[in-house]
Image (spheres, rainbow, N blue to C red):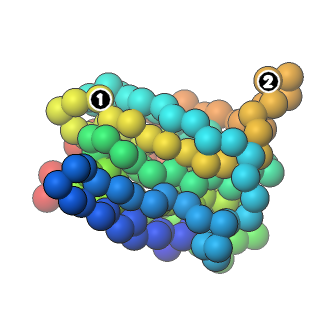
């Protein structure tokens, strides 16, 4: 596992009215601070990535559909430098992925319907000077192929 990345298994509590799932609590060990909460989606087969933050920690949970969330450690001083982690997250595997600064991340919708991600980052988005640094999802220096991995 990439240094600083934490996976929290989410508990789904169903009853005859529906279901409840807590995503992040202030008493979780991974909780640093609240910046904002937002949702983003991806259509089947769409890839959103790569990017990283210099200050912000992300706390991502897929609440509809399934996503392949991929992380790459580009931190030269990290014990897990150049490590790649792949997580299949969503309705069939409800997890929260905690992503520290300087770890590239992206995701691909792997379900047959649009997937929805909720992110609870530690910082508010600054429209004038965003803490977001991008690389192409295809053909960059990151050693990952977004195509389907059978087997």
Please tell me how crowded label 2 is: few (under 14), some (14-19), or many (20+) other residues with Cα within 10 Å: few
The Cα atoms of the two marked residues, 1 and 2, are separated by 26 Å
Quarter placement of the C terminus: bottom left
Q: Nearer the viewer, residue 145 or 102?
A: 102
Count of numbered circles on the image: 2
As drawn, is 77 to the left or to the right of 37? right
As drawn, is 25 to the left or to the right of 11? right
Q: Secondary structure at mark 1?
A: loop
Residue 147 found in image quarter: top left
Q: Looking at the picture, how far across and down is residue 65, in whole percent?
A: 27, 41
Q: Secondary structure at mark 2?
A: loop
Q: Which residue is depicted at the point 61% across and 73% down? A: 28
Q: Dots 1 and 2: beta carbons under 8 Å?
A: no
Q: Looking at the picture, how far across and down is residue 90, in whole percent?
A: 31, 51
Q: Nearer the viewer, residue 75 or 52?
A: 52
> Which comes before the other along the chain, label 1 or label 2?
1
Residue at mark 2: 127
Numbered mark located on residue 114 in the image: 1
Q: Nearer the viewer, residue 121 or 147?
A: 121
Q: Is residue 25 visible?
A: yes
Residue 103 found in image quarter: bottom right
Q: Nearer the viewer, residue 119 or 151?
A: 119
Q: Looking at the picture, how far across and down is residue 1, in whole percent?
A: 49, 73
Q: Which residue is depicted at the point 36% across and 46% down? A: 63
Q: Which residue is depicted at the point 75% across and 59% down? A: 33
């Amino acid at each position: 596992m990439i240094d600083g990345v934490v996976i929290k298994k989410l508990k789904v509590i169903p009853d005859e009215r529906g279901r409840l799932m807590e995503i992040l609590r202030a008493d979780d060990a991974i909780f640093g601070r609240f910046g904002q909460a937002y949702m983003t989606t991806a259509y089947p087969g769409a890839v959103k990535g790569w990017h990283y933050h210099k200050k912000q920690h992300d706390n991502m949970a897929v609440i509809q559909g399934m996503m392949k969330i991929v992380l790459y450690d580009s931190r030269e001083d990290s014990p897990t430098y150049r490590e790649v982690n792949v997580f299949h997250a969503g309705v069939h595997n409800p997890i929260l992925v905690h992503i520290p600064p300087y770890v590239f991340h992206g995701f691909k919708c792997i379900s047959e319907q649009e997937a929805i991600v909720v992110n609870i980052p530690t910082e508010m988005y600054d429209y004038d000077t965003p803490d977001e640094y991008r690389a192409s999802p295809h053909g960059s220096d990151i050693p990952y192929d977004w195509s389907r991995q059978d087997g």
